[in-house]
């Protein structure tokens, strides 16, 4: 059956938004985030939105905000204009055939197409992925100011607000001993009121990780995320087999193929599932399925996307039967500017999913036009 509906325009927007405080990772200190938004307008007056946001320019991934935009504008958008937007899988398989790599760009496009199609069908995006298991999902907060006392005060405020009771601490810029002292002080202050985890963003060697993990386990930390370099699967397996503390794979996962390799070697206890790293929602769903088949637990990860990428992730994660480690879908809360008419709803330590069609968001387009980077 062919529909008469066609894709009219595919636009990309770069939006630079300051963060509420410096966000210090081992690979970059973020004072702002650059949202890469895609808007797909169709001839049936339906508009879909997607996001392909990364972290720290080229510091975290091999796509920059600028490369995502230029590659969509130059190569992907012309392939889509004039085509039937309701055939999302078909369009994405065409993109996959002709575009190498560019997972973030493909995620942004795929999300916008699914948002539009779900709106067309009058259902939340989650329904296109099998339907929801839950209407709210737990959300962790990252403590990454670089200052122990400030991080403790921030955590206390989040607990008081009942916004977060899971904290991920960014480490890897100092010596292992200094980092562990920082983490242990925070865990001591929070006690059993919160789960504390760390993310070294690949900063440690295997031997540093083995030492650090033992000390972190003693301090009461619940899990370590990507302690060592992304490509070292054998090293990651050594850490997992050491059985000191649960190990989560993050940067080691660039979609289903990596997920299969890590899972088949049982090289991690937990997967951070990310829609952008997986090349889109379907890729991320496949990563999750591979994890579950291998008895690897799930965590809903973020690339610190704004509202669009965050809600796209939430729509998918809401369909996961098991989500043992919760999510970190706090991206919009790290930003100083709102791009929605109604902000996302966070309460009782979780993000609430809207029931309205598509992503369930209303973009404030006037505001976005005002905020977007000058061309
Ligand atoms: O997990 C990462 O490596 C990236 C990101 C997610 C949360 C956060 O603070 O940084
Ligand atoms: Mn991480």
Image (spheres, rainbow, N blue to C red):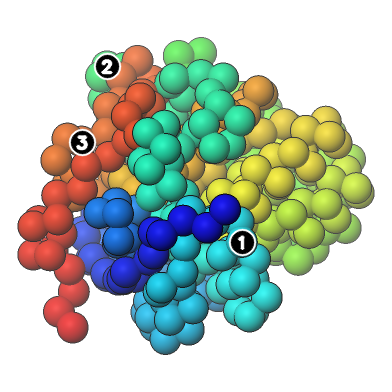
Residue 339 image offset from top left, x and y in percent: 18, 50
> Residue at 8% across / 64% down in the picture?
370
Residue 352 image offset from top left, x and y in percent: 36, 24
* Residue 66 disc label: none
The front one of 285 and 125 is: 125
**Tag nearer the camera, 1 or 3:** 1
User: Mark 2 or mark 1, which has the lower sequence index?
Assistant: 1
Mark 1 and 3 residues: CB-CB less than 8 Å, in contact? Answer: no
* Residue labelled with disc 1: 90
> Residue at 34% across / 53% down in the picture?
48
Report the side of 301 relative to 93 (left or right).
left
Label 2, secondary structure: give it. Answer: helix
Mark 2 and 1 residues: CB-CB less than 8 Å, in contact? Answer: no
- Cα–Cα span, label 2 and label 1: 48 Å
- Cα–Cα span, label 3 and label 2: 20 Å
The front one of 76 and 200 is: 76
Q: Residues within 10 Å of mark 3 (few under 14, many from 20)?
A: some
* Residue 160 disc label: 2
């Amino acid at each position: 059956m062919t529909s008469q509906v066609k894709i009219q325009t595919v636009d990309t927007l770069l939006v630079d938004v300051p963060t509420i405080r410096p966000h210090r990772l081992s690979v970059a200190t973020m004072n702002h985030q650059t949202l890469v938004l895609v808007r797909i307008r169709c001839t049936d007056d339906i508009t879909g939105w997607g996001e392909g946001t990364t972290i720290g320019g080229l510091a975290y991934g091999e796509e920059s905000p600028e490369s995502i935009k230029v590659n969509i504008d130059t190569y992907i958008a012309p392939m889509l204009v004039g085509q039937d937007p309701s055939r999302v899988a078909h369009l994405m398989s065409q993109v996959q055939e002709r575009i190498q790599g560019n997972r973030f760009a493909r995620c942004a496009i795929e999300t916008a197409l699914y948002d539009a199609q779900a709106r067309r069908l009058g259902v939340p995006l989650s329904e296109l992925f099998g339907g929801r298991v839950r209407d709210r999902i737990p959300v962790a907060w990252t403590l990454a100011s670089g200052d122990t006392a400030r991080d403790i005060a921030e955590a206390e405020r989040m607990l008081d607000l009942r916004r977060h009771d899971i904290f991920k601490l960014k480490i890897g810029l100092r010596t292992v001993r200094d980092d562990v002292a920082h983490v242990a002080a925070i865990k001591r202050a929070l006690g059993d009121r919160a789960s504390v985890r760390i993310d070294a963003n690949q900063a440690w060697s295997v031997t540093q990780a083995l030492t650090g993990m033992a000390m972190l386990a003693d301090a009461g930390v619940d899990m370590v995320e990507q302690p060592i370099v992304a490509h070292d699967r054998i090293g990651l397996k050594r850490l997992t087999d050491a059985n000191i503390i649960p190990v989560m794979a993050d940067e080691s996962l660039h979609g289903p193929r990596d997920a299969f390799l890590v899972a088949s070697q049982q090289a991690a206890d937990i997967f951070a599932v990310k829609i952008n790293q997986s090349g889109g929602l379907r890729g991320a769903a496949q990563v999750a399925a591979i994890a579950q088949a291998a008895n690897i637990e799930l965590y809903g990860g973020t690339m610190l996307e704004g509202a669009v990428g965050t809600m796209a992730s939430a729509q998918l994660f809401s369909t996961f039967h098991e989500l043992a480690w919760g999510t970190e879908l706090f991206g919009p809360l790290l930003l100083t500017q709102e791009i929605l008419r109604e902000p996302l709803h966070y309460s009782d330590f979780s993000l609430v999913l809207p029931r309205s069609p598509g992503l369930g968001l209303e973009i404030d387009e006037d505001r976005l036009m005002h905020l977007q980077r000058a061309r």
